Image (tube, helix red, strand yellow):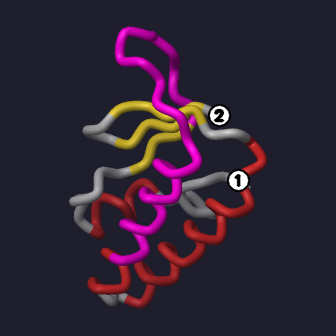
Amino acid sequence: MIVRIMGEGQLDVAEEYLAVLNRYDDELQVAIESGDDAAFRAALTALLAKVREVGTDVPAEEIVSSDLMLPATDAHVDEVRKMLRADGLIPG
């Protein structure tokens, strides 16, 4: 799956990591719903760090469409809230 982190680029993330990423996504969703900005920031940072850890960079010169878009590290909670679907940012 090709994941784009806004403002950074794309990463190729193997499907086997979806369950792990969904746990981070669930934590982010709880933090958003709680209105706790510190928890939101920590959860977003952790999710993006995990994506960077398990993904491999897609070369900038390679043109591929993204399967999933994630917010930038410094995104505001309202921006991320608008990106949420019923199952969070990551399907599943």
Residue 14 colored in magenta in the image: no
Please provide percent x and percent y for residue 12. Answer: 57, 32
The boundaries of the magenta stretch are: 42-67
Residue 28: mark in rendering? none
Look at the picture and state if 89 lies above or below 33. Answer: above
Quadrant where the N terminus is found in the figure: top right
Residue 1: mark in rendering? 2
The residue lying toward the viewer, choosing from 53 and 16, is 53
Please provide percent x and percent y for residue 35. Answer: 34, 87
Type of the residue with mark 1: Leu
Quadrant where the C terminus is found in the figure: bottom right
Please provide percent x and percent y for residue 16. Answer: 77, 48
Q: Secondary structure at mark 1?
A: helix
Determine whether label 1 and label 2 are within 8 Å by CB: yes
Find disc 1 in the rendering and name its residue.
18
The residue lying toward the viewer, choosing from 41 and 16, is 16
